[in-house]
Amino acid sequence: MARLTANATFFHPECEITDSTFGAFVEIGKGSRVNNASFGDYSYCDRYADIANAQIGKFANIAAFSRIGATDHPLDTASCHHFLYRSDDYWDDADRDVDFFTHRSSRIAQIGHDTWIGAGAMIKPEVTLGHGAVVAAGAVVTKDVAPYTIVAGTPATPLRRRQPEPIAERLMDLAWWDWSHEDLRTALPDFRSMSAETFLEKYETA
């Protein structure tokens, strides 16, 4: 029997999950922390990923120890410490700074379909990864990444195209990530054996 199903997210041990939603065939790796995030169908994260304030598309591949939506501290105030906004942890008569947390949770990182985020990479708040984009291991992404582009480094910069732009546009038009589970299974041998261009030539007219 298949390990992943449409009806229940596969959570490995020691995960911390708050205010998040998950599509079909989703897997969350051991020790991962997910807060205020949504996972599209078939997306997964590996061990000890830290994901907050993120909208993740379908078929996203998120490697171990990566971080998406890394939260910021205030920089314009006299201090940047927790006591400014987690004040109830320090004094019985002080409240949390609700406005600060509301603003933080509104800064959503957008992760496109069929993306790959390498081990130890970081995606900053409000950054958009286009469909098909790839982030190299250890990269820190501070700006939007175009579809089907590979980025690397700190801060991340374009390394090369994953697919030529005309092929990328055709893949996005085909939107295979919206196919049914049954149609994906039927096309599995072609996904495995065909180049992207050959795959398109077969399925654009199907």
Image (cartoon, grey):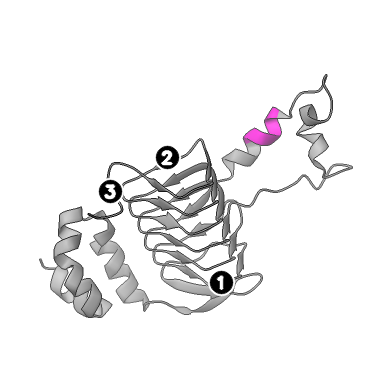
Q: Secondary structure at mark 2?
A: strand
Query: Residue sitting at 35 percent across and 59 percent down?
Result: 59
Amino acid type at circle 3 is Thr
Q: Is residue 200 visible?
A: no
Disc 3 or 1, which lies upstream in sequence?
3
CA–CA distance in space, label 3 to label 1: 29 Å
The reply to whether dot 1 and dot 2 touch (C-beta < 8 Å) is no
Find residue 206 and name its label. Answer: none
Where's residue 36, x and y in %? 53, 40
What secondary structure is the stretch in magenta mostly built from? helix
User: Is residue 178 found inside the magenta-colored segment of the image?
Assistant: no
Where's residue 127, x and y in %? 56, 56
Query: Residue sitting at 39 percent across and 66 percent down?
Result: 132
- For label 3, the crowd category at 10 Å Cα-Cα, with few meaning under 14, some 14 to 19 and many 20 or more, is some
Where's residue 124, x and y in %? 61, 56
Q: Is residue 84 left or right of residue 128?
A: right
Magenta part of the chain: 98-102
Amino acid type at circle 1 is Ala
Find residue 21 and name its label. Answer: 2
CA–CA distance in space, label 3 to label 2: 15 Å
As rendered, which of 166 and 159 lies closer to the eye? 159
Please determine whether, in this image, residue 169 is positioned above or below residue 67: below
Mark 1 = which residue?
137
Q: Secondary structure at mark 3?
A: loop
Mark 3 = which residue?
5
Query: Residue sitting at 37 percent across and 75 percent down?
Result: 165
